[in-house]
Amino acid sequence: MTSTVQTSKKKNIFVRFLTMNTSGEASGRELPLWRQLLLQLLTLFIAAAVMFPIMYVITMSLSSVSTRPSSLELFPKEISLDAFKQVLDRPTANPVTFLELLKNSFLLSFGVGLAALLVAVTAAYAFSRFNFKLRQILMILVFIPLLMPAIGLMTPLFLMMNSFRVFDCGGGMIAIQPFLSCASTGKLLFNLRDSLLGVGIAMISGALPFAVWNLKGYLDTIPKELEEAAAIDGADSNQVFFRIVLPLAAPQLAVTFFLGFIGHWQEFAMPWLFLTKPESYTLAMTLYNMTGQYANAIPWNRFSAMAIIVAAPVAVIYIVLQKQIVGGLTLGGVKG
Amino acid sequence: MAARTAPVETMRTKRQRAILPYLYLLPAFLVMSVITFYPLIYQVILSFTNFETKHLMLGMSSPDLENIGLQNYVDIITGGLPVQNFEFFRVLVYNLWWAVSNVALHVPAGVVIAVLLNVKGLWFKKIYRAIYILPVVVPPLVVATVWRNIFDEQYGAMNQVLTALVGLFGGDPVRIRWLFEYVPPISWLLPTGALPLAYYAMMIANFWLGWPFMTLVATGALQSIPSDLYEAAAIDGASNSQQFWRITVPLLRPAMVPAAVYGFTLSFNLFNFVYFMTGGGPARSTEILVTFAYDLVRNLRLYGVAAAFAVIIFFVALTVFLITNRITRATESYAEA
């Protein structure tokens, strides 16, 4: 009995939630049938309420009819992949392919997740393992941005990125603002603000403190004995970090990366503020365009297909990577 | 000689050891100084200026950029902005009410459903659990867009359900303008302005999104309550409701309070959901602080005002954090006691 409790404690919260045995057969009190039926009615009702929007969207996405739904259907009458095909073929009115949008979304979320992780990991190690003079102050400095909702730094970041521009001054001269500028007004070649790179850099600003926080929390739970043993055997601090700490922290590195990935996969505010060119739009922006003031023009079956496509990677990562995800979520609560 | 070199070497290694943590911190601080600390300072400077679209070309070196002191802050607080339908304190109160009312629904519902799923001998438990997790897994912006369509006046599922229900009694098709009706259904609810119909629509959608996480947390906590407690209580003649209020609720509290605090912070800054569902409308009546901040820079393009507003948001967030932190601490000591 105790052994089963032990193993179930080690499993992640999702698996525990799904598999735990709470029926308590051991104590052997039978549920009276009328109560069972009453409770079944209740649980069925909740299940129906949960499934309602999901079935609604799935049904619409599987319909080949592109008009708006005239009556409520929660079960697909036909299974047609037309809407998915159309979305993959030509997601918006702009001449942008689905692959480009996907690439933009992927590059942003992958790049930001990875960059934040790489920069954060050594800082997390320093905060977790060293005791130094300025530790307290530096930690407060790193974590103060966590208090701020992500929107909070958008204005200065927008203006900073916007001031980094490359001009063609004519006559083969190229000027990079803010360091150089043309004598007369030149032709704008590149605006960091209006590029995926600029958005990515701005997004790292929010991702980095979270990554440091998340990794430090995990490193704190790794016992120090291994590192001490390695130090006695003559390993220096760098060897300890690369040979012992990094391999031990690998699972949490993956979790931090994927949390960053799914977080920024859904990122909408910054790209929507920074980017103006349709070819650098992301999937989240496209989805917003499908519901915004232009929604009248968008067939609902394609909208539904798009919603499912945007949701799919997040749902898959959540389900596959259930492990510390709830712990990560609770940490993320500090950040808006 | 040999005895003398040893202390020198240890001093050198000592110095190296003292520098080492700073070396490890260097990359993060280099990056943060460019994209976090500098913008923070820049933001404060901006907030004292009248930076607008016309200054975008030349930035801070624009000739007509003025230092206007605290004017932006005064304008925000007193409603002197050139923005329609915006009063700072109404939005702040609405924002707080939005977060509190969400948590006040999600936590009890989450606990009750967790207890329901915990009933001994309930059939199909595993199926229900698998279904109940689904809302946690779907990204909020997709949830918001889908619910936005569900609340569509003409074609949305909500009105179609209601039409079907009313149709049973021979009523007319229902055409409730969920997200755009301005006249509030209950006019006395908040002192600073009534809640529009869109608020209730958003509460329904966010309820769908929010309770399963609370159930997840509560189920985990229910697991750690030893069953002998209930058996002992049953022997002593405690009824089911007495067991719930005297055993379940107090023992769930240490787990649910941090979850509630988390939910509160999340709802308070729920940008994507609000922006995708109503965009703060109708007439800014469902606007929260972060969506208004976004509107200031994205659509109104009043960069100086936006910077001042972000500074105000920072202090609101700090206050909220200090209060919630105290609440969490208080329950921690409760759990230890």
Image: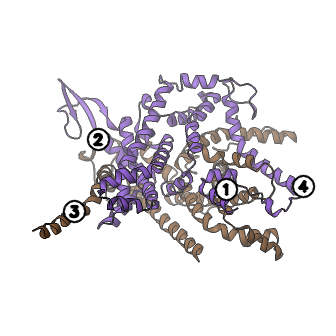
Residue occupying the point 50% across, 64% down: B320
Chain A as rendered: colour: purple
Q: Chain of mark 4?
A: A
Q: Are marks 1 and 3 on the same chain?
A: yes
- The residue singled out by tag 2 in the image is A163
Tell me the quarter of the image containing the N terminus of chain A: bottom right
Circle 2: residue type = Ser
Residue B302 showing in the rendered view: no
The disc label shown at residue B215, or none: 1
User: Of discs 4 and 1, which sits in the foreground?
Assistant: 4
Q: Residues within 10 Å of mark 4 (few under 14, many from 20)?
A: few
Q: Residues within 10 Å of mark 1 (few under 14, many from 20)?
A: many
Q: CA distance from mark 3 to mark 4?
A: 75 Å
Q: On screen, A127 above or below B178? A: below
- The residue singled out by tag 4 in the image is A33
Q: Chain of mark 2?
A: A
